[in-house]
Image: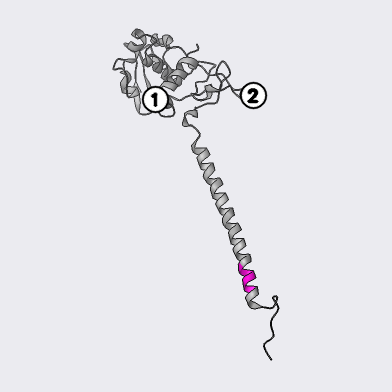
Amino acid sequence: MNNKSCDEGSNPTSQYKSTTLSSIGSDAAVSRRKLLLKGLAKGSVVAAGSVSINSFASTSSITANGKICSVSGTQSAAHSQATGLPTCGGLRPDHYKNLVQWPNYDGSATPPVATNSVGNKTFTQNTPFNSIFGGGSAKSLIKILEKDAASSPDFHWIAALLNAIRPPVGYVFPYSPKEVLDLYKGIGATNSDALMFFKGYMETI
């Protein structure tokens, strides 16, 4: 009679079940692997997104007291491998009270003038502060330097901008003129943190 029972190895149903279970196990492993990789990728994005934009600076350098020369970098000491970097610094606002110290000073003009540009903005010593920075005093840059006290934030922002245009010989100024204007607007760091950095670390000469 043809009612022989088949052993498991020759039973098509058993083979199907074995293949299906194996496939499910493999699919589950692949799914777990994909989920893990997805999680890692997501973590990488989060980690990248968590890096503060206020770390940006035009040139790598360290402050006179050995800190990374940026708004955020001064919150911790430089790593040992970074100690060979050039020193950053800038001229004090008082230095710029004398127009001849400005970048691009032209003493042959009548009256003498210092003409500089940042992006599409061109300014002289007589340009109102707020037309360059987008806020602050309506007084001219030179009047602020001549008349305002050191307690005036604008006093220090002008020095930062001029230092960025032409850093002192032998020193690095870490931000470009455009970045100084951005920092004033709170782009890259808060205005107050940037001001503290410029006053505390960049007015060294």
Q: Kindly identify which residue carries mark 1.
A: 181
Residue 140: give x, y in percent of width and height.
Answer: 31, 15
Which image quadrant for residue 20?
bottom right
* Residue 147 circle label: none
In the rendered structure, does residue 19 fall within the stretch colored magenta? yes
Q: Kindly identify which residue carries mark 2.
A: 80
In this view, the residue in front, 118 or 32, is 32
Q: Residue at x 64, y 26 (%)?
A: 81
In this view, the residue in front, 133 or 73, is 73
Secondary structure found at label 2: helix
Mark 2 or mark 1, earlier in chain: 2
In this view, the residue in front, 120 or 189, is 189
Region rendered in magenta: 15-20
Disc 2 to disc 1: CB gap under 8 Å: no
Asked if 176 appears above or below 37 in the picture, the reply is above
Amino acid type at mark 1? Leu
Q: Residue at x 38, y 28 (%)?
A: 119
Asked if 19 appears above or below 153 in the picture, the reply is below
Distance of label 2 from label 1 (alpha carbons): 32 Å
In the rendered structure, does residue 142 fall within the stretch colored magenta? no
Q: Residue at x 45, y 18 (%)?
A: 196
Quarter the N terminus occupies: bottom right
Q: Is the magenta region chiefly helix, strand or loop?
A: helix
Q: Is residue 124 left or right of residue 14?
A: left
